Amino acid sequence: MLKPIGKRVIIKKVEAEEKTASGIVLPSQAVEKPQIAEVVSVGAEVTEVKEGDKVVFKKYVGTEIKVDGEELTICEVADILAIMA
Amino acid sequence: MLKPIGKRVIIKKVEAEEKTASGIVLPSQAVEKPQIAEVVSVGAEVTEVKEGDKVVFKKYVGTEIKVDGEELTICEVADILAIMA
Amino acid sequence: MLKPIGKRVIIKKVEAEEKTASGIVLPSQAVEKPQIAEVVSVGAEVTEVKEGDKVVFKKYVGTEIKVDGEELTICEVADILAIMA
Amino acid sequence: MLKPIGKRVIIKKVEAEEKTASGIVLPSQAVEKPQIAEVVSVGAEVTEVKEGDKVVFKKYVGTEIKVDGEELTICEVADILAIMA
Amino acid sequence: MLKPIGKRVIIKKVEAEEKTASGIVLPSQAVEKPQIAEVVSVGAEVTEVKEGDKVVFKKYVGTEIKVDGEELTICEVADILAIMA
Amino acid sequence: MLKPIGKRVIIKKVEAEEKTASGIVLPSQAVEKPQIAEVVSVGAEVTEVKEGDKVVFKKYVGTEIKVDGEELTICEVADILAIMA
Amino acid sequence: MLKPIGKRVIIKKVEAEEKTASGIVLPSQAVEKPQIAEVVSVGAEVTEVKEGDKVVFKKYVGTEIKVDGEELTICEVADILAIMA
């Protein structure tokens, strides 16, 4: 298992055009494309999101890493824009 | 529903030339064009504006996202310039 | 009515060469031209100037917006250089 | 009268080669030329200099403004280097 | 022995494609490639990781040094992204 | 007399190759050449050096000014590297 | 004697390939080459290292100065990476 440090979170990206219960679809022409992800793990200083949260985050941030064939992203919690509640 | 994190707000842009009760019309030649929007949702740390406020914000800021076919913008509350009261 | 947020102020520019009671005339060759304005509205955190003050501010700052045909500028109070007392 | 805001001061430049009581003459070949000025007015937060002080300040700083035909400069007190005591 | 100062840590890189108990494999096409390392020594102000921790860190950070033929890296603890727990 | 403001000091440069009691000679090929000076006057917030101190400071810092034919430099105390004790 | 100011230290570089008791040898191909030095003198605010410490520091930092024919470097304590204990 990977435990992010401090204010970092580990997220797993969700397909860009996915239709979720809250009906979010990402615009494909947006200049700064956001992306949807599920929070996998959070650092000890992270209070804004928790494991399992579906979130919108800034694309092209963080560091990608593959664990057991699964592609994950380690980013700052400040890169998370909103929670799908 | 989307809940912005921290000091972020979600706004819905209003047509640029709209005539509102307070009579605001945006100048089309301004170098840094502002834009009018309605606040849809605010983060837990936002005290300056609330849901439903009509606001003037800096154009070209934030991240655009489409929810149920509706185009929204997630931005920092610091990008909001003024409230139409 | 427009209410600026935080440390912002809304000002209305005064003609550059105007002769006021305090006799201020702006130099037309200055590298960084200042400009005179009247304060229209101030944010909740602004204590340095108040509505009605005649002020000298840095040109080329802020965001221009037209309200009922009147051109206004929303800027930071830190862009105000001096008050004409 | 012009009252500078916060930590700003209004100064009136003195001729570069002037010989004062303290005998200061500015070097004409210095890379960053300083300049002598008299303090005309100070902001409410300025404690380092007072009206009437002869000071050395960094050239090319501040905003120039003409009042009743007199050329003045509004600058930050941090741009004042020394007082001629 | 080398003792890093303040918030620095000394780490020893682990081969990029290594399969550990937690099954981490690094993606070889990632733009900002992370890398796995073992913490060798930590500065007095470091509380986030300890000697012996397997960590993911940002590649291309820190200063490389060879001690007794062993290649080590001295970096800031802020360059450590996650701990393999 | 010139009194520097705040954390500034006025220094008088000493010849670069001078042999002092402490035997300091400046290397002529150093990339960032330091220079020796004597402290002439210090601002009210300066506690690190005092009038009369021989100091090593970063070359190419500060503002040069000529007083009674004597070339002086007004710089920040942070530009003083060491005292020759 | 030279006394560094504040958080500065004076160090004397040790030959790059030297074999010390702790067996440190510097890699000659490292992009950002570190270098070994002995601490000669420390400023009043320096607590991390003391006179006589053998340290690893970032190459190309600080200001070089020659004292009695001995080449020394005045740098910030933050440029010291680790102590050879």
Image (spheres, coloured by chain):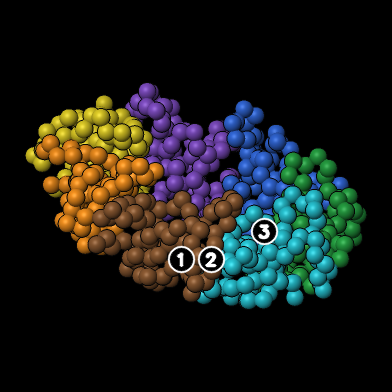
Chain colours: A cyan, B green, C blue, D purple, E brown, F yellow, G orange
Badge 1: residue crowd in 10 Å (few <14, some 14–19, many ≥20):
many
Q: Can see residue E30?
A: yes
Q: Residue at x 20, y 34 (%)?
A: F26
Whole-angstrom CA distance, mark 2 to mark 1, is 11 Å
Question: Can you give x and y, in whole percent of width and height, for residue F42 in the image?
Answer: 28, 47
Image quarter of residue A19: bottom right
Is E73 or B9 nearer to us in this picture?
E73
| Three-letter code, disc 1 | Val
Is G2 or C47 nearer to us in this picture?
G2
Is G84 or D76 nearer to us in this picture?
G84
- The label shown at residue E55 is 1
Q: Residue at x 31, y 61 (%)?
A: E4
Q: Are marks 2 and 3 on the same chain?
A: no
Q: Do the residues bearing badges 2 and 3 touch, measured as CB atoms within 8 Å?
A: no
Q: Residue under label 2, please give it.
A: E24
- Circle 2 chain: E
Q: Residue under label 3, please give it.
A: A58
Q: Residue at x 43, y 60 (%)?
A: E14
- Circle 1 chain: E
